[in-house]
Image: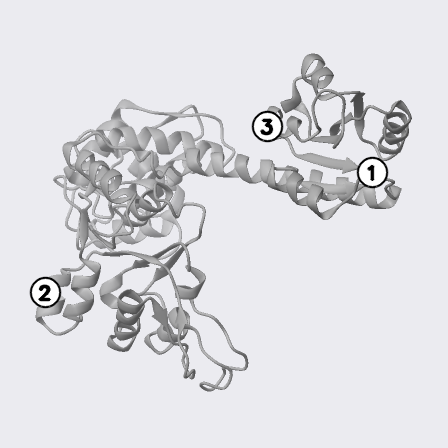
């Protein structure tokens, strides 16, 4: 139940307000002064404090600082613009004049308490997100990751543009979010654009917006993602895939701080910080004429290189253990541990898909595991001399479909022991799955 503290030196007002709020299911206590409130209660436990402006000893606005974030609604019979402005300047959440209308008072209190709940929910959600998907707290203890953390710490407080390099799946977006969260822009949005996922004929409209009638299908004016990031951060993933026409518009946004919607004759000012990422050799793209040199140098003020997972040593074990805990929680599964053979398989595997592949493998293993331990069978990693099997079929669908396709493709060339090793399972498990799926051994 919502708890409210009423501070008023008139007993009649305190009593009437208490009865009114009780009828609307609020839990209310009341006192006659700020000093009495501070002496008798922890002011931070209340959802709302309603205080008269003129009180004996200290004005009602004095409770604002003492309440340490608890919203304070100021009421007074001496209503004036000056006192209202002063109360709001001191931090009051709202202001109501006596004699107040009962419906108006309840409406104001309902709004304030609902806003307070939303703020607490948002804070709790942000805490969960930071715990489940750590940004500034990324996992890594190898030297290469320490250098990444050092770069993030140094560049985040600035407005400098950053290029993030790394193979697919290494966590480039995570780095971008870490930079944003540690920057002065953290309370503004970070807008993510995958330049390779948007058709080239639509990318300009997505980035810069368009006016009504600018092209077929433009039935109404629409702002672009660059405008959506105004005041915050624009993260351009797979920047090397950006077509030349869109590169020109992005250069204008970086140079002049303005965008022009498609079909518009006017420009709009924007204030965005640009972070870009790619797994391509962008300097090579520039040399080949596939990427604008001037845009490259605008973006390439600071660079951060993310190492592939196979070069991060024991980080893979720490990441795997952390992912197991997270996946169990996300999938509402009982806690499980990684067995010794699972840890050995994880360390031995090449991880061509990097952290993203590890995350997928752990999620799959948590789903498949029935007991309190994940073993190498659950991971279903295709192990072959510590490197990925490039000729293995990549089949859509279930793990059973992958298993069936892999076995049929390789069983004529490999022994059962070799097949099992390539699949990262034991011979016994291989035999059991053959039986279950009806795949007899070839003669």
Pick whichever of labels 1 and 2 is earlier in the sequence: 1
Disc on the earlier residue, 3 or 1 = 3
Few, some or many residues within 10 Å of mark 1 (<14, 14–19, 20+): few
> Which disc, if any, is residue 284?
2
The residue tagged 1 is: 77
Mark 1: which secondary structure? loop
User: Which is nearer the eye, 269 or 204?
Assistant: 269
Dividing the picture into quadrants, the one containing residue 124 is top right
- The answer, for residue 345, to whether it is visible in the render is no
**Which of the two discs, 2 and 3, labels the residue nearer the N terminus?**
3
In the rendered image, residue 128, in percent from the top left (x then y), is placed at 48, 35
Which color scheme did the rendering employ for the protein? one colour
Q: Is residue 179 above or below residue 66?
A: below
Q: Real-space Cα distance between discs 3 and 1?
A: 23 Å
Which x, y percent locates residue 410? 20, 51
- Between residues 249 and 43, which one lies in front from this camera angle? 43
Which label lies toward us, 3 or 1? 1
Alpha-carbon distance for marks 2 and 3? Answer: 58 Å
Name the image quarter holding the N terminus.
Answer: top right
What is the number of the mark on residue 395? Answer: none
Q: Position of residue 189 (x, y in %)?
A: 44, 52
- Measured in 3D between alpha carbons, the distance from the residue under mark 1 to the one under mark 2, in whole angstroms, is 73 Å
Q: Residue at x 35, y 37 (%)?
A: 362
Label 2 sits on a secondary structure element that is helix
Residue 121 found in image quarter: top right
Q: Residue at x 35, y 39 (%)?
A: 135
Residue density around tag 2, few if under 14, some if 14–19, many if 20 or more, within 10 Å: few
Nearest the camera: 129 or 40? Answer: 40
Q: Please provide percent x and percent y for residue 57.
A: 72, 20
Report helix, strand or loop for mark 3.
Answer: helix
Dividing the picture into quarters, in which one does residue 136 lie?
Answer: top left
């Amino acid at each position: 139940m919502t708890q409210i503290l009423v501070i008023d030196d008139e007993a009649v007002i305190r009593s009437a307000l208490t009865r009114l709020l009780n009828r609307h299911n609020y839990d209310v206590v009341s006192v006659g002064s700020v000093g009495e409130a501070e002496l008798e209660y922890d002011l931070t436990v209340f959802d709302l404090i309603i205080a008269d402006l003129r009180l004996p000893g200290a004005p009602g606005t004095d409770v604002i600082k003492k309440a340490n974030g608890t919203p304070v609604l100021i009421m007074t019979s001496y209503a004036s613009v000056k006192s209202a402005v002063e109360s709001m300047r001191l931090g009051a959440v709202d202001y109501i004049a006596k004699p107040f209308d009962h419906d108006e008072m309840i409406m104001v209190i309902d709004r304030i308490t609902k806003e307070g709940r939303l703020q607490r929910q948002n804070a709790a959600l942000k805490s969960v997100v930071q715990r489940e998907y750590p940004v500034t707290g990324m996992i890594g203890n190898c030297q290469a990751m320490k250098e990444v953390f050092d770069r993030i710490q140094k560049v985040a407080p600035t407005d400098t543009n950053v290029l993030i390099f790394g193979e697919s799946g290494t966590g480039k977006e995570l780095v971008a979010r870490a930079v944003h969260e540690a920057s002065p822009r953290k309370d503004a949005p970070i807008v993510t654009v995958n330049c390779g996922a948007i058709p080239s004929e639509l990318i300009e409209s997505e980035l810069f917006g368009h006016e009504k009638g600018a092209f077929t299908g433009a039935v109404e004016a629409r702002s672009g993602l660059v405008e959506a990031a105004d005041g915050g951060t624009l993260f351009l993933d797979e920047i090397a895939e950006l077509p030349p026409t869109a590169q020109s518009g992005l250069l204008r946004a970086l140079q002049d701080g303005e965008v022009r919607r498609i079909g518009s004759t006017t420009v709009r000012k924007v204030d965005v910080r640009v972070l870009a990422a790619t797994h391509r050799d962008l300097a090579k793209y520039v040399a080949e004429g596939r990427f604008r040199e001037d845009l490259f140098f605008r973006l390439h003020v600071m660079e951060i290189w993310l190492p592939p997972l196979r070069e991060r040593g024991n980080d893979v074990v720490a990441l795997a253990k952390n992912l197991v805990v997270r996946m169990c929680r996300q999938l509402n599964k009982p806690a499980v541990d990684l067995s010794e053979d699972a840890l050995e398989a994880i360390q031995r595997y090449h991880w061509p898909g990097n952290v993203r592949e590890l995350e997928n493998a752990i999620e799959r293993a948590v789903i498949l595991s029935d007991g309190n331990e994940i073993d190498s069978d659950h991971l279903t990693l295709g192990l072959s001399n510590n490197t990925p099997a490039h000729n293995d079929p990549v089949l859509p669908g279930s793990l059973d479909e992958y298993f069936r396709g892999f076995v049929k493709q390789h069983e004529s060339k490999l022994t059962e022991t070799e097949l099992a090793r390539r699949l990262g399972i034991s011979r016994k498990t291989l035999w059991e799955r053959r039986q279950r799926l009806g795949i007899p051994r070839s003669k």
